[in-house]
Amino acid sequence: MRRISEEDAIRLLAAARGSVEAAASGARLPEPPEGGAADLDAGAFVTLKNRADGSLRGCIGSFSGLGSLGRTVVRMAAAAAVEDPRFFPLRPAEVPGTRIEISVLGPMERCSPDSVVPGSHGVYVRLGRNAGTLLPQVAVEEGWSREELLSHTCMKAGLQPDVWRTRPEIEIYVYTAEILSED
């Protein structure tokens, strides 16, 4: 996994915050940062959490990226703020109370259920038209075992929790992520 410098992390997080502010107020999104890690061709997820209680407020990402990490971060931050279908769009008054986290994704690799390492791996499952993912930090935050992580990823994909045990045709992939956080 690559290491993103502290300077680049600060620039990417500032771009994400500017994008969240713009999206919440209906303004034009900022130009993506350029240079350094912002020029990487990498997928990323942007997660928004309530500073007061840590509850999820939005999370959207792209596995393949949108041309550059800077562009991906700006677009995914805006989407997390106003397009996550699980939440009402973020209002401008909520932005200061929102903490931003960027997960810069490593490559995805197909694996067996026994190869999944909670806390190290994010998991992506696919069966037919159903697909879902959980980022590596989710298993740590929730205190999940490998089995619980696989079951919750299946449920997020709209599948039965034990389908990873009962359907050999299910596709299971793992990936790593470098986490950049405002905290």
Image (cartoon, helix red, strand yellow):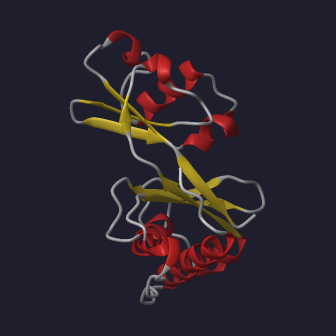
Residue occupying image coordinates x 59% and y 81%? 92
Residue occupying image coordinates x 35% and y 10%? 166
Vertical arrangement, residue 109 with respect to residue 82, above or below: above
Vertical arrangement, residue 169 with respect to residue 181, above or below: above
Report x, y in % for residue 136: 57, 41
Report the front residue among 35 and 11.
Answer: 35
Name of the residue lying farthest toward the top: 166
Name of the residue lying farthest toward the left: 128
Query: Is 181 left, or right, of 30 in this rendering?
Result: right
Residue occupying image coordinates x 46% and y 59%? 44
Q: Which quadrant is the C terminus positioned in?
A: bottom right
Report x, y in % for residue 76: 44, 67
Vertical arrangement, residue 17 with respect to residue 49, above or below: below
Report the front residue among 144 and 121.
Answer: 121
Report x, y in % for residue 86: 47, 53
Residue occupying image coordinates x 58% and y 53%? 178
Report x, y in % for residue 51: 74, 63
Count all numbered tags in the image, as a single digit.
0
Residue 170, by quadrant, is top left
Vertical arrangement, residue 134 with respect to residue 33, above or below: above
Report the front residue among 91 and 169.
Answer: 169
